[in-house]
Amino acid sequence: MKQNSNLMQSIQGRITEIAEKTKIKLDIKDKKIIALLAEDARMPLALIAKQIALSRDAVDYRIKRLVDSGLIIGFVPVLMLKKFGYYWFHVYLLLDETQKEKQNELIDALKSHPNIRSVMEYSDRWDIEFILIAENAVEFDNIVTEIISNKAGIILEKSKLEVIKYYKSIHIPDIFYRQVSENISEYAKHTIRNPGTAKNIGESDLSPEETKTLYSLDFKDIQILNILSKNCRISTYKIAEEVNLSADAISYRIKRMLTEGYIEKFTIILNLSMLNYEWYTFAIQIKTLDKENEKKFREFVRNSPYIIRAVKVLGRWDLLLYIVTDNSAAFHHTIKEIKSNFANIINSYQTWSAYKEHTYNHFPKILETKYKKKKVLVFGTFDILHPGHLQLFKDAKKYGDHLTVVVSRNATVKKVKGALPRYDEDDRLEHVKAIDIVDEVMLGSLGDKYEMIQEINPDVICLGYDQHSFTEKLSKKLKEMNINPKIVRLQPYKEDKYKSSKLKEMDK
């Protein structure tokens, strides 16, 4: 699977300014490729070629052309963020138009925030909509307060909504699939979903049981997801080089994340403006929504060819729809259908026309922070490596993601034990480096031993069961240095058999 090296590292917005629109001519083969990639962006070139009757090289060329033109702006995993413990929130802002510089500062602040999913600019009732993820309402409120704390002078009005249920969530309107399905082979029809019949489940549709998992993500998984979020067509071999795992291990972890529901699927993100699509947000305030009407509404939005997202929200509005159409008549018809089908429950509504999406972040950076690499530190002489040492490293690695081993210097060993070790410090360093489970090895300091701990700044320090040199005052010293790692004393492993001093005696 080839990687498109020129793919953008961060996803730009799906709606661009009028002046930036560059129409692109697509033939039916291009549309078939887009439809197939939308359902599985990791689909091999050979399989795509087979389904649309082109050569593998021709498919590769067309995909690169779609990327170079700016139409495909990302090959990405669709993440079920509720599985990660996050919920969706929307904020709408009305801004003071006389303060353009501060508006730009606000947009830049939003784009760089680790919790932000999308920043959309409108030309109607609201100026800015931003979507963010948070673990709860309190965290959401704190984030919003932090973002707008020094921008209060330009914010004239704001409205906040919390997503409580998803009815539909796709990236390309169903009208595109319908146009493709008219000219597609029977074989490919089994791969490209039929409009209106897709699962389209959103994280808010997941039951409490479905959000639970037997598999908890670790830092390696997050590294893999981060790489996939930049270009999910990258091969497992390329990912393996960056993550320091085998290609088979990468493949297994990706399959496990798919099975457990962290990843729903792999898809593509398009510049919808280049397809001549316009974006509208339709907000509805309802009188009441009983089960019968809710079921009817769900079926309506899932069968609509132009609605790409529909959610139930808590706040000023009750329902939020994102409508993407290629002409004003289609938009008008969609709104008329909504009003006629749900006249009995609609109390009021508003439509807002999108002007530009400043950013669309399918992998919010907060996920990296939440699953940040946990550093574990072990230090010792490690003169004659034995199974007890290997077990020490294995037990220590259970407390984090990155294991650093500090090997004592010759002078330090002589000072503490009264004699030089059997092996020189450089040899002992190389011996520990050869152990796969160890991520980093370094020689200790000849000066203040505690300064090295401050430099490494571990989350956890693991001590051997009989390790007492420099450890009696460890907690006090760490507090003085204003660092607070967890200190764990590990259990011995067959200490009657595997102990360096005993092994040395046996060698005499």
Image (spheres, rainbow, N blue to C red):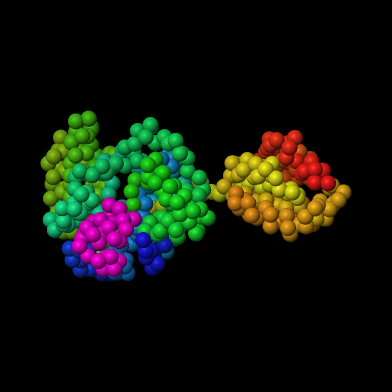
Relative depth, front residue between 131 and 66? 66
Q: Is residue 28 visible?
A: yes
What secondary structure is the stretch in magenta mostly built from? helix
Left-right relation of 146 to 38: right
Q: Residue at x 30, y 61 (%)?
A: 45
Q: Quadrant of the N terminus?
A: bottom left
**Toward which corner of the image does residue 462 lie, by quadrant?**
top right
On the image, the x and y values in percent for residue 183 come to 13, 58
In magenta, the rendered stretch is: 31-60
Residue 411 against residue 19 in the figure, above or below:
above
Q: Residue at x 38, y 68 (%)?
A: 6
Relative depth, front residue between 65 and 292? 65
Does 199 lie within the magenta span? Answer: no
**Toward which corner of the image does residue 166 lie, by quadrant?**
top left
Q: Residue at x 42, y 50 (%)?
A: 251
Left-right relation of 123 to 141: left
Does 36 lie within the magenta span? Answer: yes
Residue 84 against residue 123 in the figure, above or below:
above
On the image, the x and y values in percent for residue 487 come to 68, 40
On the image, the x and y values in percent for residue 259 come to 37, 42
On the image, the x and y values in percent for residue 150 come to 48, 53
Relative depth, front residue between 445 and 165? 445
Relative depth, front residue between 388 and 234? 388
Q: Is residue 461 visible?
A: no
